[in-house]
Image (cartoon, rainbow, N blue to C red):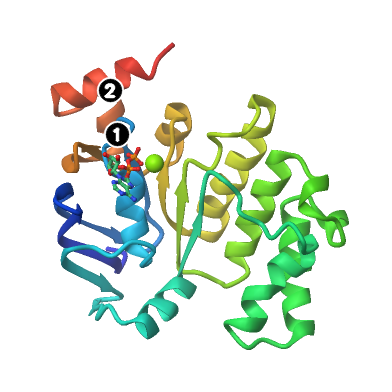
Amino acid sequence: MAKEILRVEKLNKFYAKQQILYDVDFSIAQGEVLALLGPSGSGKSTLIRCLNGLEEFSTGDLFFDGQKMVPTEKNWQQIRQKIGMVFQSYDLFSNLTVLENIVLGPIKVQKKSRSQAVQIATRLLKRVGLADYLQTYPRQLSGGQKQRIAIVRALALHPEVMLFDEVTASLDPEMVRGVLEIIKELSEKDNMTMIIVTHEMNFAEQIADRVLFLEDGHILENTPSKQFFVNSQTERAREFLESMKF
Ligand SMILES: Nc1ncnc2c1ncn2[C@@H]1O[C@H](COP(=O)(O)OP(=O)(O)O)[C@@H](O)[C@H]1O
Ligand SMILES: [Mg+2]
């Protein structure tokens, strides 16, 4: 059994009086890929934002490497270096070159030397096919290129877990594949532990070991993906999968 890297216990989240997440429980083992699926508004983004402190949760516990996380700002800063996140909107700094966007974290947060950080950035950019874009500004890039840079920026901190929140949702169709291929390679070559929110069901089926199916803030299924896509346990999950076909 691979070691458990992240565990969530009885996580509840409210916005004002409205409850968004209900007693969410799950864990993820080293190298495992979890697809977090569910209808729009079911709480997927809120849940993964709670995992790296972008959202406060109301009650519940988070364990990282078996250690209970005490939610202080200092602890979150450490956790954020271990849990990288990429969003739908690649929020690159528009006034900085690709290189400067990537080296910022390693230098500022991890106190790496500039030459070390540049080396990391160069290696990762080569890997995603963007070695020639070090001095380019984000506005000169396509959406797909920007999203690959956003992935590189997160990887430059050497995270143990990566969270992807609909990273291809705002891309032109022809850009989607390149980004998904990078994510797939991270799983296959690097054995990266990942939680992926996506509307690309074929991709989810190919890449995920397990599916968490969320509806109205409840986890309705936590199922091996082979089973989920062929024979979901709940009627709601079957309806959801049906609605994703077009
Ligand atoms: N900042 C916020 N303030 C209040 N309600 C929010 C906020 N962000 C999200 N919500 C609500 O939380 C619920 C879950 O949203 P979200 O996590 O974005 O779902 P999903 O990512 O599955 O589409 C929705 O009802 C949404 O309206
Ligand atoms: Mg969302």
SS label for mark 2: helix
Kindly identify which residue carries mark 2: 240
SS label for mark 1: loop
Quadrant of residue 16 in the image? bottom left
The quarter of the picture where the N terminus appears is bottom left
Kindly identify which residue carries mark 1: 38
Q: Amino acid at mark 1?
A: Gly
Residue at (71, 62) in percent of width and height? 124
Q: Amino acid at mark 2?
A: Phe
The quarter of the picture where the C terminus appears is top left
Quadrant of picture, ligand 1: top left
The answer to whether 116 appears left or right of 29 in the picture is right
User: At which x and y percent is residue 230?
Assistant: 28, 23
User: At which x and y percent is residue 215?
Assistant: 21, 35
Q: Is residue 216 above or below residue 242?
A: below
Label of residue 200 in the image: none
